[in-house]
Amino acid sequence: MEQNELIRIENLSVTYDGKTALEWVNLSLSEGEFVAIVGPNGGGKSTLVKAILGLVPYCGRIEFAPEVADRAAIGYMPQMNNFDRAFPISVGELILSGLQGDKGHAWGRYSAEDKAKVAEVARLLGIYTLIDKAIGELSGGELQRALLGRAIISEPKVLVLDEPANFIDPKFEGELYELLTELNKRITIVMVSHDEAAVRSLAHRVVCINRTIQPSPAY
Ligand code: ADP
Ligand code: MG
């Protein structure tokens, strides 16, 4: 791998039940970048980020630099329609679950330091007053903020966001993008997005995926 390279993907392909979702994907991610992944519905954007996270079986090669070799070094905010809202946990517990390690699931088993971190992240995302609320009672935008909290609490080196603003209310959307710009000063970001304006203003590089990497649209 080159210097500054964090993740290198070579000849990646993913098939679901014999159906090809991705093939011949080559992509390299360098430290400090903000990369946007765009493309049509069903084009394989979520599949690509899941492969990076090791959440789907794939063929090909994904290489990680030593500083991101540990799974906890990569924060992940999944696309929200894939998230089970009926899961009976609170906002605080959801954010806490982003701290890796085998601490069990109960709130009570986490240290005061961990809980202080949760409070800090919740405050940053404007959901501090919701900390004890069950996630099933949240609006889409509130749940999306909590998912972002889970993704950033471990202070990852790389942050992977799959359509983070889908359910965010317009008022918080601007704040979210400001926050991502701020985070990008120390965290490398990969963001799947349909939001052209956001992509244009935030990303250093746009990668268009439709089964494989397409020539980039003119952003
Ligand atoms: P995007 O995020 O760009 O909308 P996806 O990565 O979700 O695309 O999906 C790519 C293709 O793979 C689509 O045809 C989708 O139907 C299929 N697919 C995604 N996940 C699964 C799965 N778990 N099982 C079977 N097919 C899937
Ligand atoms: Mg998707």
Image (spheres, grey):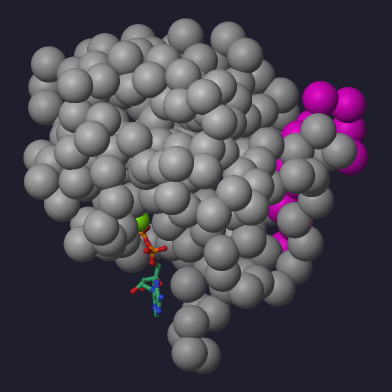
Above or below 44: residue 208:
above
Is 6 a magenta residue? yes
Q: Which quadrant of the rendered structure holds the N terminus?
A: top right
- Residue 201 visible somewhere in the drawing: no
* 47 or 92: nearer the viewer: 92
* 13 or 152: nearer the viewer: 152
- Please provide percent x and percent y for residue 68: 75, 38
Q: Which quadrant of the rendered structure holds the C terminus?
A: top left
**Secondary structure character of the magenta stretch overall:** strand
- Residue 129 visible somewhere in the drawing: yes
Ligand 2 quadrant assignment: bottom left
- Please provide percent x and percent y for residue 4: 81, 25
Count of marks, rendered view: 0
Q: In the figure, residue 178 lies in which quadrant?
A: top left
Q: In the figure, residue 149 lies in which quadrant?
A: top left
Is 106 a magenta residue? no
Q: Residue at x 88, y 33 (%)?
A: 2
- Please provide percent x and percent y for residue 105: 47, 53
Q: Residue at x 51, y 90 (%)?
A: 18
Above or below 211: residue 126:
above
Q: Residue at x 34, y 35 (%)?
A: 92
Q: Residue at x 10, y 40 (%)?
A: 139
| Side of 59 relative to 75 (left or right) | right
| Side of 172 relative to 22 (left or right) | left
Q: In the figure, residue 189 lies in which quadrant?
A: top right
Which span is picked out in magenta? Answer: 1-11
* 103 or 148: nearer the viewer: 103
